[in-house]
Image (cartoon, rainbow, N blue to C red):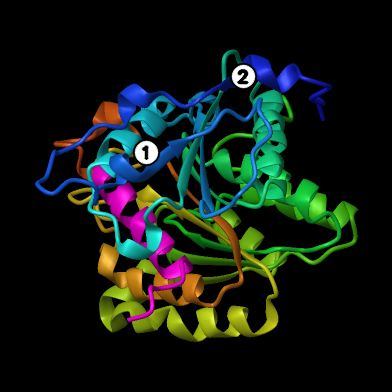
Amino acid sequence: MTSVKGNEWLSRYSPPALTLWVGRRDNPPGDRVYENITLMDLRQKNAAKSQNFGLLGLRSDEGVKRNLGRAGAFDGPSAFRKSFANLALPLNLQNKLVDFGDISAIDNDLEMTQEAFGFALEKIIRSGFTPFAIGGGHELSWAFYQGLIKAYPNEAITIINFDAHFDLRHLNHLEKGTSGTSFRQIALNLKKRDLPFRYLCLGIQSFSNTHFLFEQAKEFQADYVKSDDFFLKGYEAGLPLIEKYLEFSSKIYVTICLDVFQAAIAPGVSAPQVLGIHPWHIIPLLRKLAESKKLVGFDIAELNPAFDQEDRTAKLAALLSLEMLNALSPKEKE
């Protein structure tokens, strides 16, 4: 593995841009995300006070390209911020959100970019923030987990992935990762450190995963729920496994791949799913996970504005993030 030494990560780091945080002007003002966001530079020493949640973007197309997908996810973090900025913010989240900027894949060295992202994420965690991230392709998960490894080196953090795909593919012919290998890379890393791989995937598409990938899921002892079950049973299709994982996990990382949703709802992804699920199939599950107080962070991957329509996918990513953040933050006492 390549290694980020000293301040090498800075060449891939961009501090947050105020120009992305604009929105509607209300009378009275003050209740929208852009009016409550704080911008912080990771090159400075920061400490969480009333601001509890730190946003970090991964601007990357390299994993998607290696996986032969549709490029365009590089601009996902910017599209997300523009949609997120205008949302009405609950009282319990006001002045608790911080944008730390982006890590960018400035060359073909995805491995160095992922390690730089992990280094930056560790800084956010150690400064006292709960991190949430936006991609970029689903190579984001291996980048995010590297930050968790650094912050919690002796713990096997449970992964709950809402996704149409297992993303347990082999590395490519050059022995490099792609947007479809993150969870195999995590599993292999945990095995090297003699820690268990705990992986639950919800929204799996039967005809978007080969027989080999279902066999890999079995080999890695992954649990999963197919998209068919969500249509037949609603969110309750995923509830038993969510409750099972909550019971035995002390720390949980949640990742949402936007291609888990129907293409009509989320057209702006690298691999659109005509028979994908509906957001309300999983929102109650996301709330339950967040309210458990076991989440150490979450991310949303595969936002591809090059193929989005009327910012539908970016708005969905923004709303899902706000759902999670709202459930994670203590409510104001009445």
Q: Amino acid at mark 1?
A: Leu
Residue at screen point 59% across, 84% down: 244
Q: Please give the residue where the numbered disc 1 appears in the rendered image.
A: 303
Magenta stretch in the rendered image? 313-334
Is 98 left or right of 170, judged from the image as shown? Answer: left
Q: Amino acid at mark 2?
A: Arg
> Viewer-proximal residue, 93 or 172?
93
Whether tag 2 and tag 1 are in contact, CB under 8 A, the answer is: no
> Viewer-proximal residue, 171 or 145?
145
Is 234 left or right of 189, judged from the image as shown? Answer: left
Is 27 left or right of 5, judged from the image as shown? Answer: left
Q: Quadrant of residue 160?
A: bottom right
Q: Residue furthest left?
A: 27
Q: Residue 12 got which mark?
A: 2
Q: Is residue 332 magenta?
A: yes
Residue at screen point 69% across, 68% down: 198
State which mark lies toward you, 2 or 1.
2
Tell me the distance, in whole angstroms, between the alpha carbons under discs 2 and 1: 20 Å
Q: Position of residue 147 (x, y in %)?
A: 70, 44
